[in-house]
Image: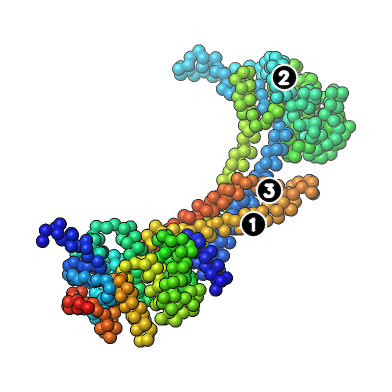
Amino acid sequence: MTTLTGHRFGWSMLPLPVSIAIAHLRARRRQSAVSILGVALGVGFFIAISGMMHGFQHYFLVQIVESTPHVLITDEYRAPPAQPLEVLEPHAALDLRRVVARDPVRGIANAQAILDALQSMPGLEAAPALRGQGLLRRAGRDYGVTVLGIRPEREAKATQLAGEMVAGRLDALDAATDGVILGTGLAAKMAIGMGDSVLLASPTGGTARLRVVGLFKTGIEQLDTGQIYVQLAKQQAVQGRPRVINEIRVRLADVARSIPVADALERRFGYKAAPWEETNSRVLSVFQLQNVIIYMTTGAILVVAGFGIFNIISTVVLEKARDIAILRSVGMPPATVTRIFIVEGLVVGLIGMLVGWVVAVGIAEALRMIPAPGSTDPTQTLRVDTSPLSFAIAGGIALATSILAAWLPASRAARIDPLTIIRGAV
Amino acid sequence: MPGAVMEGVVEMERGLRAVDLVRLLPGPVPTVLVDGVSLTIRPGALAAITGPSGSGKSSLLYLLGLLDRPTSGEVLVDGAPTTGLDSATCDRLRLERFGFVFQFHFLLPEFSVLDNVLVPMRELGALSGAGMRNRALEILDSLGMAEQADKLPAQLSGGQRQRTAVARALANDPPFILADEPTGALDTRNAAAVFEILHGLARAGRTVAVVTHDAGLAATAPQRFHLVDGRLVTVPQPA
């Protein structure tokens, strides 16, 4: 009796609706366990899958941020300047033929002054470049490439190119006026290596024979197979645009400030200054879509788990009509009856959430052992970023779904007329 | 009689009183459950409500216990009118002042005997945890059920379950005990024992009303009311 008494005492220490709710769930262990498992799997997969997605996105963003300028100033304007005719006759309806739109000579005017101004700003490194199209010719075959004429010593400070070199050094460009640095992908495609020579031709007809002095690898296919670096002066000569630059590549000490800094630079210099978020907006919008899909899919598991809870509590309400009748007849108000079944949903949700957290850690650990697809490094495994926030969000959704799923049957329980049940039993 | 004098008299009155109580079940043709019943059940002596099946005796008991509301008429609890009370107040009154025993015990199957008796006390919350336990064990002891305190209802005999139901009805020490066919599902020996318990509760000063089919048991009641077709056909017999 003593041990039982101790047990009883603990049992009745809980608020009445809670102990009745727990008694109901204990009486249906298997059904309760299935409902809890539903919530747990929902929570677990929600956290693990969203963690994997965030890990992948984070990895990808780091690659982008490391390999591209944080802010790119180009020789363009946000709003193209008005054509002379539009200025002259803003409201006219004229029929003019063979008009060639006025297009001033491209290139950043006053480039040196702008560069000097940028250099004086703290937390910011800037590198000039002339970007143009070109053809690399080798063994009778042409390869279309984007050619960047750079100043290696500035480029080293403004981008991560120096760190991405896998053969040769960035400053080799300084020493060799005919030097070219290309991506490993392109080198493999062209079957050339260090010291080999290639012919570069520009659309304007300029040509130059170049010698490979370095190879880089960013991990971004587009760059590794389609971008080459030459000396700025060489590029200007090949493109026939002496002393012209059309890009200023800016790197910030704090990458998070890219948008306000870009805004400020654009306002000050007039040229379009695009933060990396804008340059890569397509990737970011794909990420957003990806997020929506993943959250909807994993959220759906939690909603389905909610149906499980709805199911068990509806069954309990039907089975327990007599209990509800007696509780109402001894004076338990309908609100307390509702509370019993809401607590049942909440208990399932709460245990499901806790078990789900453990499941999430397990799935995340398992995923971290899977080799990252497409990676050349065999030791590289999937990156899974599970944050406390994702645990909180998944837990919050689980609890909210549980309460919502319990609400309908619970409010039906409160509407049970005790007399109907008591009369029916006689 | 002037209202003030009437009120004065009413305030002094203890027990349950029905005044011209009518209960209709709405429908295309309304069913008359209780048809103009007036009666007074006084404390101190058991009251038996008898009548054939469908005569409205259970319906009358539910009206007296505030489980149901009359179509017209009035129920006075210790002289206080109950018409117009909201359902929350009725819930509270039932919790504090009424104990119910039904033909079927209606015990919570997952709860032990002791936990079942604790239910009304925990809902009321007037005593401490230890206080509630002690009182519940006292009640069970007085009904010879102390040994069964930790058993589940499924482990009890019919008579023991009904005693547990009586113990639960007594949990909050209510002045009114209403029993609806409490012996209906019991054998003769157990029925007599439960009836004797109810007699004892009445003798201790409670107002106890019992609906029963059993003429023999009803005959032992000092107050008797007989219903036919919802109407009271005999007057109370003073003890």
Please name the colour scheme applied to the rendered image: rainbow
Q: Residue at x 68, y 18 (%)?
A: A108
Label 3 crowd (10 A; few <14 / some 14-19 / many >=20): many
Residue on which the image places disc 1: A359
Q: Identify which residue, A420 or A375, lies in the foreground.
A: A420
Label 1 crowd (10 A; few <14 / some 14-19 / many >=20): many
Q: Earlier in the sequence, mark 2 or mark 3?
A: 2
**The C terminus of chain B lies in quadrant:** bottom left
Residue A332 image position (x, y, % from top left): 38, 62
Q: Identify which residue, B199 or B35, lies in the foreground.
A: B199
Q: In the rendered structure, which amino acid carries the disc numbered 2?
A: Gln
Q: Earlier in the sequence, mark 3 or mark 1?
A: 1
Q: Identify which residue, A197 or B55, lies in the foreground.
A: B55
Q: In the rendered structure, which amino acid carries the disc numbered 3?
A: Val
Residue A408 image position (x, y, % from top left): 42, 58
Residue on which the image places disc 2: A119
Q: In front: mark 2 or mark 1?
A: 1
Q: Are marks 2 and 3 on the same chain?
A: yes
Kind of element beneath mark 3: loop
Residue on which the image places disc 3: A384
